[in-house]
């Protein structure tokens, strides 16, 4: 009887493997056929970028596409987010796939026929708007995945939830948005998500390659505001002042000792950066106050706590030593936790990534101090977030324009690999469950 049960189990397993292989062959064929369409979607989104919580046009195109595929659609989630629910023909887990939609206040400098000409007001100043981090690619790829998986829904063992998320780069001042708000509004419920997969195009990783890392893969981030209050005086009589500009300069210099003298850099990286300093309006007036804005990034909860404590201590004590006062707000407007890839999920799904890209093209990469609000999803359910190559073959990664810059550029020939990878991860996870 024991041998008979073992035989039955083996036959079922072999049948499942064969079926999964057949589905992957269909994915491969359909993804190749969709390549031109995915690129066309991406170019349209690139030419018409929208800032966080304002992705109205983008969301409308996504919703209409999902509806045309027979996918159940929910709109207006977390302002402009779109959720599609595809119920497979057979019972199984709920797999979520996520793409972010928003652009950045960056004026594009790349000479492309579909370059963005969009202008907008941001924080009181006029800027161009550009998909300068590749979110246009993410949306187009996930729309392609929806096309492929919906065409084989009767063979899917479970449900696929497509999450198109606004405001990954942060919502406008005074607003909520992004992954955190999507979760609050039920993006991982009804039906309850078992696992989530996501990708990020990378302009400094060669096309055809995939990068991954188990555990902490992207940093936790806190923005910060430091206001230094002193006493104003005529610039000719500085002894009558408590100079907030000199005090701010000392604070900036002293903050550099936090990473260099408090962090074991052989174990983890971290960043304390002041990105803006504003104070005064004339050459001969010492102002009353100075405002500094910056970012803190860490790859562990422990390091994050240490950085915050030290920034507050150094800023307030340095100001106090000069007779000034420093007020520190951390976070000032946003906080993302560490993007943490579930190690067990990585071990389980790594063979899928290797099969779709070739083992030699799937690379273990170091952690990075960039941040991602995909981390909020991974706090709730096991997640796998990987990097998709978008750099032209043969280019020097050190010379490739980085994300968030006017010269950011993506080679579109890597999109089909992204479609295949997300489809195969979904099918294999469902088969494995």
Image (spheres, rainbow, N blue to C red):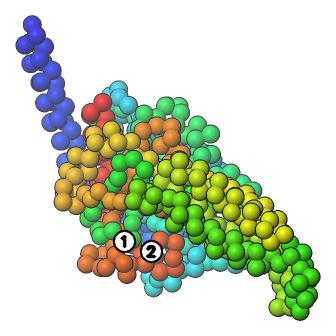
Q: Which residue is mark 1?
A: 204
Asked which quadrant contains residue 161, the reply is: top left
**Mark sitting earlier along the chain (1/2):** 1
Q: Position of residue 390 (x, y in %)?
A: 35, 69
Asked which quadrant contains residue 325, the reply is: bottom right
Q: CA distance from mark 1 to mark 2?
A: 7 Å
Q: Name the quarter where the C terminus is drawn.
A: top left
Residue 4: which numbered mark, if any? none
**Vertical comparison of 313 with 252: above or below:** above
Q: Nearer the viewer, residue 347 or 274?
A: 274
Residue at (64% x, 70% y) in the render? 254
Disc 1 + disc 2, Cβ < 8 Å: yes
Residue 402: which numbered mark, if any? 2
Q: Position of residue 242 (x, y in %)?
A: 86, 76
Q: Residues within 10 Å of mark 1 (few under 14, many from 20)?
A: many
Residue projecting furthest to the front: 321
Position of 152 with respect to 135 (left or right) is left
Position of 237 with respect to 74 (left or right) is right
Residue at (84% x, 88% y) in the render? 282
Residue at (55% x, 40% y) in the render? 187
């Amino acid at each position: 009887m024991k041998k008979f049960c073992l035989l039955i189990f083996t036959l079922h397993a072999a049948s499942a493997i064969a079926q999964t292989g057949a589905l992957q062959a269909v994915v491969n064929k359909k993804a190749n056929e969709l390549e031109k369409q995915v690129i066309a979607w991406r170019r349209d989104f690139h030419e018409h970028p929208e800032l966080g919580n304002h992705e109205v046009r983008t969301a409308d195109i996504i919703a209409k596409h999902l509806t045309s595929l027979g996918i159940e659609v929910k709109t207006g989630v977390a302002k402009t987010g779109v959720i599609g629910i595809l119920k497979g023909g057979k019972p199984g887990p709920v797999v979520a796939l996520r793409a972010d939609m928003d652009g950045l206040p960056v004026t594009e400098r790349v000479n492309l026929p579909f370059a963005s000409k969009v202008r907008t007001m941001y924080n009181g100043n006029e800027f161009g708007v550009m998909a300068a981090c590749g979110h246009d690619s993410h949306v187009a790829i996930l729309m392609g995945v929806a096309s492929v998986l919906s065409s084989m829904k009767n063979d899917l063992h479970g449900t696929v939830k497509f999450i198109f998320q606004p405001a990954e780069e942060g919502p406008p001042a005074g607003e909520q948005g992004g992954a955190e708000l999507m979760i609050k509004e039920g993006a991982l419920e009804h039906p309850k998500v078992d696992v989530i997969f996501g990708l990020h195009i990378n302009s400094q990783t060669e096309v055809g390659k995939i990068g991954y890392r188990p555990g902490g893969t992207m940093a936790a981030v806190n923005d910060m505001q430091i206001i230094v209050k002193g006493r104003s005086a005529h610039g000719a009589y500085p002894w009558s002042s408590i100079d907030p500009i000199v005090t701010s300069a000392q604070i900036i210099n002293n903050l550099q000792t936090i990473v260099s003298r408090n962090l074991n850099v052989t174990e983890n990286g971290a960043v304390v950066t002041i990105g803006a300093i504003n104070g005064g309006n004339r050459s001969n007036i010492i102002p009353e106050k100075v405002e500094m804005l910056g970012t803190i990034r860490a790859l562990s909860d422990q390091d994050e706590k240490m950085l915050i404590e030290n920034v507050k201590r150094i800023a307030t004590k340095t100001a106090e030593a000069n007779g000034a006062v420093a007020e520190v707000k951390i976070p000032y407007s946003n906080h993302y936790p560490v993007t943490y890839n579930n190690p067990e999920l990585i071990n389980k799904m790594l063979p899928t990534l290797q099969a779709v890209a070739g083992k030699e093209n799937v690379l273990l990469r170091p952690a990075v101090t960039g941040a991602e609000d995909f981390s909020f999803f991974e706090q709730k359910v096991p997640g796998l977030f990987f990097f998709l190559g978008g750099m032209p073959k043969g280019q020097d990664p050190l010379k490739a324009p980085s994300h968030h810059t006017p010269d950011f550029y993506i080679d579109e020939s890597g999109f089909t690999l992204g479609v295949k990878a997300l489809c195969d991860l979904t099918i294999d996870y469902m088969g494995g469950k």
